Amino acid sequence: MYLLGEQPTYADRLTSRLQAVPAQLLNTLPPCGPVIEIEYSSDLSQTLPSDQVFMIESGVVHGVVDNRHLFYLQEGDLFGLQQGLDLTPCLHTCEAKLRLIPYQRCAALKHMAADDARHELFVLYLLGQSTLLADALARLDKSDVRPPKGFRHYAAGEVLIQQGDIAEHVFIILDGHAEAWVNGEKVGDIIQDEVFGAMAVFTKERRSATVIASQYSTVMVIPQEQFLDLMQSNPRIAHRLIESMARCIDTLNKQVIQMRSQIHS
């Protein structure tokens, strides 16, 4: 998915990373029919079967929200997941020749859910697409003085999370690097694609550590309600996140033991 108009660097980077995901998701799954060719359509939902999803082989699909051309999909993008669902209206059109590879929706979803890695990748793909769209809408509405929730970027030395603060968001570093500090002592590194800030959301405790960007970083910010819903609907992701937090706790415990040994030696 590409957003119309001038885009910030972080959106371009996320878009590039998401572009290759559909091919990975549908790898080894055979199409349900021959390539579909469409010359023109003012509403693709009226042209295409509602029980199929499509990989765009060539051409461009335009996304229109509230009579605004907001984004477009092109070669490699996955299209049609929302077909037949009662969601916020988004009109999809094409103004030139379009070639689509069809897959049965149920078969595609089962294929993605059958493998843990594919299932997690699919959820992250949907989350990334939703974040891009929300960011685009926020920047279109200039009358809204609230900062967009989708992305934030931090210079080296800026604080992402402050120890003791109330937890309202979970974070994913899209690009960059950060460090976790507890009471002035460094306790760990946070690298690209790592989820952080979730422990306090789960426990409803205040932040147990301060996170500081060690270089310029772009971060996806997920409101706690949305993240908790995601965990409830995707227990495998929740399990992996809990494992990650357990490893962090184990590392912290080892560092504390080492510090105590140094003090008593």
Image (spheres, rainbow, N blue to C red):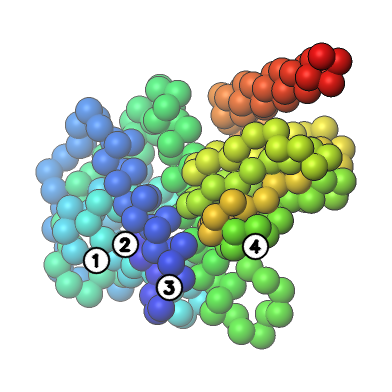
Earlier residue among tags 4 and 1:
1
Asked which secondary structure carries label 3, the reply is loop
Residue at 85%, 50% in the rendered image: 165
- Residue flagged by tag 4: what amino acid is it? Lys
- Image point 40% across, 79% down: which residue? 5
Residue 18 is situated, as x and y percent measured from the top left of the image, at 37, 50
Secondary structure category for the residue under label 1: loop
Q: Amino acid at mark 3?
A: Gln
Type of the residue with mark 1 = Val
In screen coordinates, is 52 left or right of 147?
left
Instruction: Give the mark nearer the N terminus: 4 vs 3.
Output: 3
Measuring from the top left, give residue 111's x and y in whole percent.
Answer: 35, 27
Real-space CA distance between mark 3 and mark 2, rounded to the nearest whole angstrom: 15 Å
Q: Which residue is mark 4?
A: 149
The picture quadrant where one finds residue 22 is: top left
Query: Mark 4 against mark 1, which lies toward the viewer?
Result: 4
Label 3 Cα neighbours within 10 Å, binned few <14 / some 14-19 / many ≥20: few
x 43%, y 67%: residue: 9
Q: Position of residue 99 (x, y in %)?
A: 16, 57
**C-alpha span from label 4 to label 1:** 28 Å
Lower sequence index among marks 3 and 1: 3
How far separated are the C-alphas under marks 3 and 1?
18 Å
Q: Is residue 73 visible?
A: yes
Looking at the image, which is closer to me, 41 or 193? 193
Q: On the image, numbered disc 2 is attached to which residue?
A: 73
The tag on residue 60 is 1
The count of marks equals 4
